[in-house]
Image (spheres, rainbow, N blue to C red):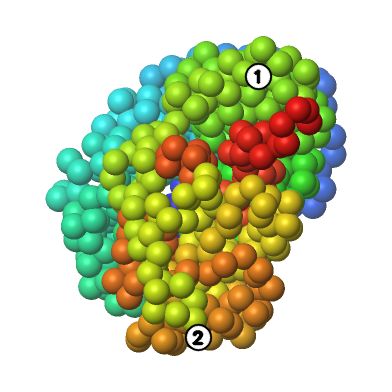
Amino acid sequence: MGWLLSSHFSCPESKSEAMSRALRIAAALAVGLLTGVLSASPAFSQNASPEDTLRHAMELQQAGDLEGAVQGYRQFLAARPKEAGVQANLGVLLAHLGRFDDAITEYKKAVALDPQNGDIVRNLGLAYYKSGRISDAAGEFAKSHAMSPDNLQTILLLADCQLRMGENREVIKLLTPVEAEHSGELAIAYLLGTALLNEGQIAEGQKRVDRILSKGDSAEARFLLGNQMFAAKDFPAAVKQLAGAIELNPSLPGLQSLYGQALLNTGDPDAAAEAFRKELGSDPNQFEANLYLAQILTVRSQWKDAESLLRQALRVRPDSFPAALELAAVSEGMGKLAEARSELDALKKKWPKSAALHQRLAEVDQKLHLTAEAAREKKLATDLSPHSASTASGPGTGEVAPSFNATRMGTNSRVSLAELRRDGPVLLVFGSYTCPNFRSAADALNKLYPEYKSHIPFYLIYIREAHSTNNWASTRNQREGIVLEPAANMGERQDHATVCIRKLHIEFPTLLDSMEGAAEKAYAAWPSKAFVVDKRGKILFSTGLSEQDFHPNELEAALHTAATPVKESRLPRGGR
């Protein structure tokens, strides 16, 4: 959200208002001497008085010789170490030079000397902010806000940090009381609107969107509209709106990151990765861009790059469970199993009820040949898996698979789930040709089918198109030239399924969902999902088919588990 900082106010590190006596003297001495750019100055004399050294340092600063000024300030402070104003100004120079760690050190010294100076505290926060230590920055901005509650600059800086850390409710709590007093401040409308949308308070967020829209078309307005659509899970519409914002201002902080997230949700990880990289090119500390790009690279086994991104994400949000869990996955992928297990054990103390954590730990323990431990963690993962009766999220592991009827390809005959699983477990794959995620997963499904088809039937349940021309084609579909009108009747749905089977070389049987989408709704399967239903008729395993969600090895493990008793029951009597 850094755009608002430069668009609505300037926030460079300022000098301390409580200038020290020596600094006031030096400033007076410098009157009339600091006009124009000076030529290179001689080195500082060790015999010069502190006041002369300070005056010379200020001359160099005004002339643009920041490194020389730093040297002068340091020499002055060696003689007068308790001058908070000079200490703070040294921090200013170091920050302008991009030496944020050094600047933080100097600001801390200044704060220790003048702890009630809100400007110095805020500058310390800015140094943390620019170095990517957002949590530390928020702490300093909170202190500065307590000292000067009406300082709008500090309020907005604190709100920006809170938003970056995902603390949307804190943003709402901070900005709501000051909104009326600063009704013309669009930065407040932007930050507060974004936080409200992130919290699912769409109507309240819309009020702030409208306020920005009333000022005319802008990248910020389209960004907020895209955010609103993203919050409503209308990802194709969000992509379109965010792309429009990018046309107006591609460098708007946070925009490329949200665009990348929307692209991920429409099945275009390649374009998403490009968007995340653009975001990080201008803001290396953007949390979501670091995290989601790392997840893409983890899936693609680019471990080193993923590790670097995740460590940066954790600098911004040290308590992020998703980033920490992904880092453990990277350690596992790099073969650092002991390190991965240590990381997961540490996470388990803070998040003991995470099914995903226990599942990951079970996999690591299995690789370490810790059989008993792996079995225990796997059981915990199963016990903790979400069991939801809501069709909004689909049936959970351990729940009874919802009944449905579908039409066999090439006939008008109907078949029920009970008939499909009459002889044991089944794999149900829901998808359509215009779903990029399903197309990407098809190759792995085709490879698994020959091995398991004699033990577990595979069925493709062809549902409504994920990205028909009526629902705005995805960016990936546009690149690949895939265009399908929405099916108006069962005949057209069968035509689409026929194209899908032929193009993706699918050999397992295909069934057609009804035009009302009964099966799709029962499993919350749009745009694409897969479910392993065991011999008892319960969900053994489920997964989305996006690059981030779908792991063929996990599906194969579930198929193996489901097929094992079937294989054994079909063995001839008398031995194996």
Q: Which mark is residue 166?
A: none
In space, the residues marked 2 and 1 are separated at their CA atoms by 47 Å
- In what element is the residue under mark 1? helix
Nearest to N terminus: mark 2 or mark 1:
1
Residue 111 in the image: state x and y as whole percent: 50, 20
Residue 417 in the image: state x and y as whole percent: 41, 55
The reply to whether residue 309 is in sight is no
Q: Quick one: label 1, few (<14), some, or many (20+) residues within 10 Å?
A: many
Residue 41 in the image: state x and y as whole percent: 81, 43
Residue hosting label 1: 374
Residue hosting label 2: 495
What residue is at 40 percent from the left and 64 percent from the top?
415
Residue 369 in the image: state x and y as whole percent: 78, 18
What residue is at 66 percent from the left and 79 percent from the top?
503
Closer-to-camera residue (523/167): 523
**As shown in the figure, which amino acid type bears the numbered disc 1?**
Ala
